[in-house]
Amino acid sequence: MTPVEQHIEGFRKLGQYLREIKAQTREYAPLFECIQKAQHHNGWFTQENCLKALRAWGEVLHAGALKEWTSQYNFGATAPKNIGLILAGNIPIVGFHDVLCVLLCGQNATIKLATTDPLLIPFLYQKLKEFSPLFKNRLHFTQDRLENFDAVIATGSNNAARYFEHYFAKVPHIIRKNRNGIAVLSGEESKEELAGLAQDIVQYFGLGCRSISKVYLPEGYDLNNIFGALYPHADLMDSAKYANNYDYNKAVYLMSEFDLLDNGFMLLREYDSFGSPVACLHYSFYKDIPSLEKKLLEKAEEIQCVSTHLALPQAVPLGKAQQPALWEYADGVDPISFLLEF
């Protein structure tokens, strides 16, 4: 097998391992111990959310998907370079795609893990080394400043991105900034599609860059449809961190005398901004799709995905916002091409 084929086989084995997660077995005891530590370290990383993220990766790491994805690239034999990775940590293992890309391209990486997610990706790397010896000595994890790198892929807030642009200006780089998921409804959605929208809103407590934080609605739309779809997720309030954010944001909004709709666990506010706080959802009304599409195109660099059944740019089906394929790249930037060509 070629090195790329060996890499694919290693990731295929990891995908199988993640798809078959079982709690009460000796094989998976170390994984659940790691998840428990991750939850103690970061209260947003509940066992449910960690398992959801791990199993989602299991669903995409199939041999067929990996081969289809990699077939469009020319993985020539080149001397390995060292890539600096600065990973996000807003939801569990959100930076794993960058790790996957680096390893598939035969590169090495020095990885600055997010302080909010320092445990899960190193665990997955240990499993990869068990599945293929080609992965050994390829990744180094650090909490210090990155040094000795040939290129950088960094993800952070808009403020952090300005620092990254300056600090890494002299090396090839990909710098990712804040983006948000939005939804566009036509008013003709089925109950199943509205249930999918609710899942897109609440999954991972709404902390993902693909989480839906803003909904565009046709004029006259009945907001009770959204509240009805959200109702099955009232158990979000069982999370102390989520409940504290709900209480805090509600108090701030009320003191600011903002007009709100409140169902006891989610606040709806008519507001133009894409980004919304935890336990909050912004919405706006539109007159017609062509004018809305023009507006969204003007703000495309602020949008990660559009959850909708309409034919719009960056569209994903309702309920699938947190299930990107391997080739659906964050910010629309192809890291494989970058890693092979710089």
Image (tube, helix red, strand yellow):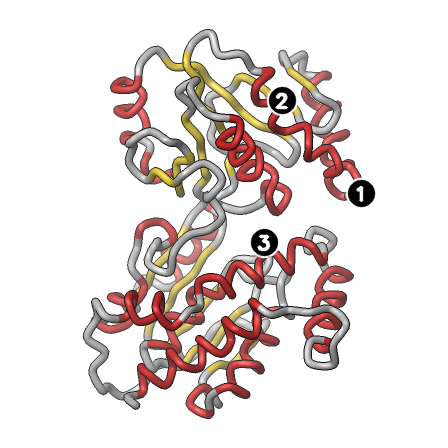
Q: Residues within 10 Å of mark 3 (few under 14, many from 20)?
A: many
Looking at marks 2 and 1 on the same chain, the residue that comes earlier in the sequence is marked by: 2
Find the distance from the CA under tag 2 to the CA under tag 3.
25 Å
The disc placed on residue 13 is none
Q: Quadrant of the N terminus?
A: bottom left
x, y percent for residue 8: 37, 78
Q: Amino acid at mark 2?
A: Phe
Find the distance from the CA under tag 3 to the CA under tag 1.
17 Å
Q: Within the image, what quadrant is residue 107 found in?
A: bottom left
Which is in the foreground here, disc 2 or disc 1?
2
> Mark 2 and 1 residues: CB-CB less than 8 Å, in contact?
no
Q: Residues within 10 Å of mark 2 (few under 14, many from 20)?
A: some
x, y percent for residue 89: 57, 57
Q: Residues within 10 Å of mark 1 (few under 14, many from 20)?
A: few
Closer-to-camera residue (322/291) = 322
Write down the residue under mark 3: 91
Would residue 172 be visible to someone looking at this image?
no
Closer-to-camera residue (209/67) = 67
Q: Quadrant of the C terminus?
A: bottom left
x, y percent for residue 12: 44, 75
Find the distance from the CA under tag 2 to the CA under tag 1.
22 Å
Q: Secondary structure at mark 2?
A: helix
Give the residue at x 28% y 36%: 313
Q: Is residue 282 above or below residue 315?
A: above
The disc placed on residue 240 is 1
Q: Is residue 46 above or below residue 320?
A: below
Which is in the foreground here, disc 2 or disc 3?
2
Q: Within the image, what quadrant is residue 253 found in?
A: top right
Q: Amino acid at mark 3?
A: Ile
Write down the residue under mark 2: 227
Give the residue at x 28% y 25%: 293
